[in-house]
């Protein structure tokens, strides 16, 4: 019983179930998209504010 709980806690901690991996990949893609926008439109004021908020 205890062993199963530890295994479950470990899965939750590292997020290595299907949902965790999907969320991580979506987050990485989103992060790269924001980074691309930031490098592409640095002169644009609102995008600057948004990326500053995200990176803070």
Image (cartoon, grey):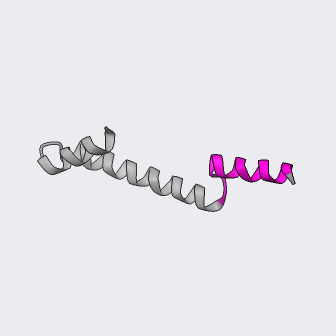
Residue placed furthest toward the front:
2
Camera-side residue of 23 and 25: 23
Q: Is residue 11 magenta?
A: yes
Q: Is residue 56 left or right of residue 48?
A: right
- Residue 10 lies, in percent from the top left, at 71, 47
* Displayed quadrant of residue 1: bottom right
Camera-side residue of 1 and 7: 1
Range of residues picked out in magenta: 2-17
Q: Is residue 17 left or right of residue 54?
A: right
Q: Residue at x 62, y 51 (%)?
A: 15
- Residue 38 lies, in percent from the top left, at 25, 45
What is the chief secondary structure element of the magenta stretch? helix
The number of discs equals: 0
Q: Residue at x 46, y 50 (%)?
A: 28
Q: Is residue 30 magenta?
A: no
Above-or-below relation of 18 to 50: below
Above-or-below relation of 22 to 47: below
- Residue 16 lies, in percent from the top left, at 66, 52
Q: Residue at x 31, y 38 (%)?
A: 56
């Amino acid at each position: 019983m205890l062993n199963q709980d530890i295994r479950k806690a470990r899965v939750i901690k590292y997020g290595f179930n299907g949902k965790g991996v999907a969320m991580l990949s979506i987050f990485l893609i989103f992060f790269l998209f924001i980074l691309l926008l930031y490098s592409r439109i640095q002169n644009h004021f609102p995008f600057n504010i948004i990326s500053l908020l995200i990176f803070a």
